[in-house]
Image (cartoon, rainbow, N blue to C red):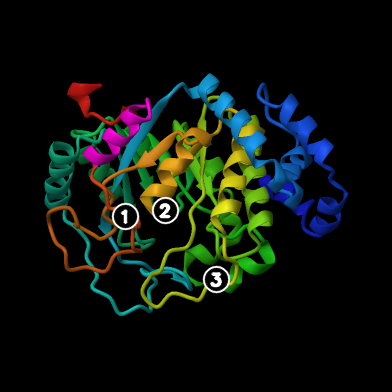
Amino acid sequence: MFHKIIKKYENFEYDNFFENVTLENIKQIIRKSGEKNLSDLEFLSLLSPKADDLLEEMAIKSNEITKRNFGKEMHLYAPIYISNICDNECTYCGFKKSNVIKRRHLSLEEIEIEAKYISENLGIHSIILLTGESNVNSIEYIKNSIEILKKYFATVIIEIQPLDIVDYETLVEAGLDGVTVYQECYEENLYGKYHLKGKKSDYFYRLDTPERAAIADIRNVNIGALFGLENVKKEAFLAGIHGKYLMDKFLNTEFSISIPRIKEAYQNIKLENILSDREFVQILLAYRISFPTLGINISTRENGEFRDNLIPLGVTKFSAGSVTEVGGYCISKNTTPQFETSDHRSVEEIVLMLKEKDYQPVFKNWEGI
């Protein structure tokens, strides 16, 4: 279990470690990287304040590693929100149970209308199904939703409440391809500060979710921390070694990591730990250099110009045309979004931008694959 590894760093002196890292140490790590995953402390060295002086060198190496392992393809995806009913009380989320917002739970017929619209108008072949974390989203409901989405999309990923292995196996039989689950906050003693009620308050059950998904033979598993909750370097480090642990243990599963920053949401907490753009770039580069085959996702939480500049640095998956409210594509515009997006460009605009940068967008539905 990953908790045994994370426990080793519970009282780790990060500041002392960073103080003893030298620029030459970091340069040596950059030079040796690219063939296999780096060690935990080599990875941490790339997150150090001193590595900030070597971002250009890191960017060059990161670009080389990415082209070697992924070519110049960029996989595009879009979210589909089907329910914003939630039983959890998370202090940073617009869907939290105590928020008085317009709630909606799409019927299977409505899901099919949304799916058909996205497929015909966005041309996306990869879709992420999202819900609030609630018992109202039964396994049968999710299973039926996946079966509908598979009629329109080649790849279906879920970002819902964590499940048991047997439930994931049921969804795999229905056509499920991937699971996204963010630990949000990796520091165990601080996790309860943000997750006050509901099943999400169980730190250990959530921490083990990616393993249960991999055991159930889910093809793709995406993890990440939510930046803005706690110390960004610690959270980036713990999320990164979580990915390394999973990659080493489950060789037949494709793992990826996201770098989501908290976005403004209804009745949201005020941020205490701001992740700057420069730190964001350093984290992305450290992930790519340290873990050469780890996928890296960048969502429309980030603005268009910033996202475009990240593309050569290690990104492999890119959201496009995103709507974060339930039924928001064509059913209804009257529910509260989970958060506000920052990149409002259409899929067509993003495809054009990628082609201008000499990247091959992978986005077409079945007929265009």
Q: Nearer the viewer, mark 3 or mark 1?
A: 3
Label located before the other in sequence (3 or 1): 1
Residue 75 in which image quadrant: top left
Res. 362 visible in picture: yes
Dot 2 amino acid type = Glu
Label 2 sits on residue: 302
Say whether residue 345 is left or right of residue 57: left
Q: Is residue 328 left or right of residue 11?
A: left
Q: Which label is found at residue 138? A: 1
Q: Is residue 31 magenta?
A: no
Residue 194: which numbered mark, if any?
Answer: 3
Q: Which of marks 2 and 1 is nearer the N terminus?
A: 1
* Callout 1 amino acid: Ser
Q: Which residue is located at x 53 percent, y 27 percent?
A: 66
Q: Closer to the camera, 321 or 333?
A: 321
| Residue drawn at x 54%, y 54% as measured from the top left | 277
Point out the stretch of residues depicted in magenta. 347-360
Q: Earlier in the sequence, mark 3 or mark 2?
A: 3
